[in-house]
Image: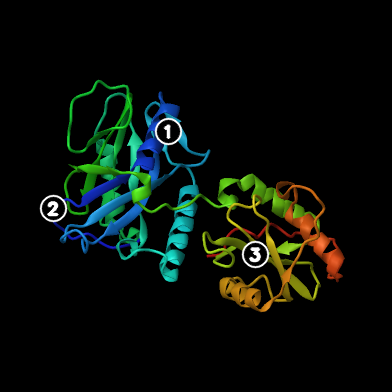
């Protein structure tokens, strides 16, 4: 969550909002007309080096909660850790872009959480007392590394009250009022917002397959376990095409002399997984799994999975690895998984 801090001042930062953010707000508000709803927001804080000393806050995208979110007419709860996982993924991909030097100097700052937007019941267009209490508690928590929060309020089907600096009319029935709270403020301030076309601001990319389709993840690893493989936790590395990190793991059969290194692109199965082999190492110790995977991957030779003519989306990892075993005579242990093996593939980070 940590990033560049804003100075403790009464001067508001310049707030720039990507059009895609407003479009996503309006779409979610229309989908939940009768209920409260909301999403987390992510973007950049530029310390003012390019704007005469006035900091800039750039709101680039939103992160929707998963199916566990609770929405009704007077309550909204974001749900489980899904948004944190997506935020971590976006931040790690952004950090990889910065390390590669892919970003112009203006955008070479950490990606960070900026707050939540919220649709409240009826005609409420500013944060509630409960919202203020929650925001102040968040800002007091030093572990969050935050010195300010944005809290836009989205409303639908209200009469047009006329222009206001902090208000943006998205479409005929949706408007957004932008609010801002610094750590030492007593209450939210309204903050003017400027809308930029999507092409004027960086894009963050889509969520990876294991977060976008967790059922596919569970199914893939259930099949690997049924085939007698024991997987490591997931690790995330920049290995293949330098656009998004890959979702990677090691796996092997009990007693085998080698392990498979598996790297799936973020849009798997639209694009295929890549495979290599390496000498056995202990999968129970994941404290250095990231570094050990990267070292072994660089030293290993790629393996080509024999084609069976079926679409990539229909081919699961277990079947592809069994094809590799048969074609390269790599199978050296029985297929039965040891009793009590549980899926240990959730991410190690």
Disc 1 designates what residue?
28
Q: Residue furthest front?
A: 199
Crowding around mark 1 (Cα neighbors within 10 Å: few <14, some 14 to 19, many 20+) is: some
Q: Residue furthest left?
A: 10
Disc 2 designates what residue?
11
Q: Which mark is residue 249?
A: 3
Q: Is residue 24 above or below residue 245?
A: above
- Work out which quarter of the rendered image holds the N terminus and state it: bottom left
Front-most of 224 and 199?
A: 199
SS class of the residue under badge 1? Answer: helix
In the rendered image, which quarter is residue 128 located in? top left
Label 1–label 2 contact, CB within 8 A: no
Q: Is residue 314 above or below residue 124?
A: below
In percent of the image, x 28 and y 57: which residue is there? 45
In percent of the image, x 40 and y 41: which residue is there? 39
Q: How many marks?
A: 3
Crowding around mark 2 (Cα neighbors within 10 Å: few <14, some 14 to 19, many 20+) is: few
In the rendered image, which quarter is residue 193 located in? top left
In the rendered image, which quarter is residue 175 located in? top left
Residue 213, percent from left and from top: 60, 46
- Among numbered discs 1 and 2, the one appearing first in the sequence: 2
Residue 88, percent from left and from top: 46, 57
């Amino acid at each position: 969550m940590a990033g560049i801090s804003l100075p403790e001042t009464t001067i508001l930062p310049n707030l720039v909002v990507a059009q895609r953010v407003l479009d996503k707000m309006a779409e979610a508000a229309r989908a939940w007309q009768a209920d409260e709803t909301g999403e987390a927001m992510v973007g950049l804080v530029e310390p003012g080096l390019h704007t005469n000393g006035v900091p800039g806050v750039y709101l680039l995208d939103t992160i929707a909660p998963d199916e566990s979110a609770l929405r009704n007419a007077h309550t909204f709860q974001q749900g489980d850790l899904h948004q944190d996982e997506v935020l971590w993924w976006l931040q790690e991909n952004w950090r990889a872009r910065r390390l590669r030097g892919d970003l112009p100097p203006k955008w070479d700052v950490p990606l960070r959480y900026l707050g939540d937007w919220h649709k409240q019941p009826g005609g409420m267009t500013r944060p509630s007392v409960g919202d203020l209490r929650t925001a102040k508690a968040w800002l007091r928590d030093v572990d969050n590394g935050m010195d300010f929060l944005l809290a836009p309020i989205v409303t639908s089907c209200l009469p047009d009250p006329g222009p206001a600096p902090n208000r943006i009319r998205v479409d005929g029935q949706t408007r957004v009022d932008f609010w801002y709270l610094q750590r030492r403020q007593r209450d939210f301030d309204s903050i003017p917002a400027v809308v930029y076309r999507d092409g004027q601001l960086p894009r963050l990319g889509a969520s990876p397959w294991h977060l976008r389709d967790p059922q596919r993840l569970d199914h893939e690893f259930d099949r690997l376990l049924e085939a007698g493989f024991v997987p490591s936790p997931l690790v995330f590395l920049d290995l293949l095409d330098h656009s998004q990190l890959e979702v990677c793991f090691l796996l092997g059969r009990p007693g085998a002399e080698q392990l498979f290194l598996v790297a799936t692109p973020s849009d798997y199965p639209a694009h295929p997984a890549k495979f290599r082999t390496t000498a056995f190492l202990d999968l129970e110790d994941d404290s250095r799994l990231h570094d050990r995977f990267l070292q072994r991957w660089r030293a290993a030779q790629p393996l080509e999975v024999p084609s069976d003519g079926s679409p990539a989306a229909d081919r699961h990892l277990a079947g592809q690895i069994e094809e590799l075993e048969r074609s390269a005579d790599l199978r050296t242990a029985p297929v039965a998984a040891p009793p009590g093996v549980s899926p240990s593939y959730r991410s190690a980070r």
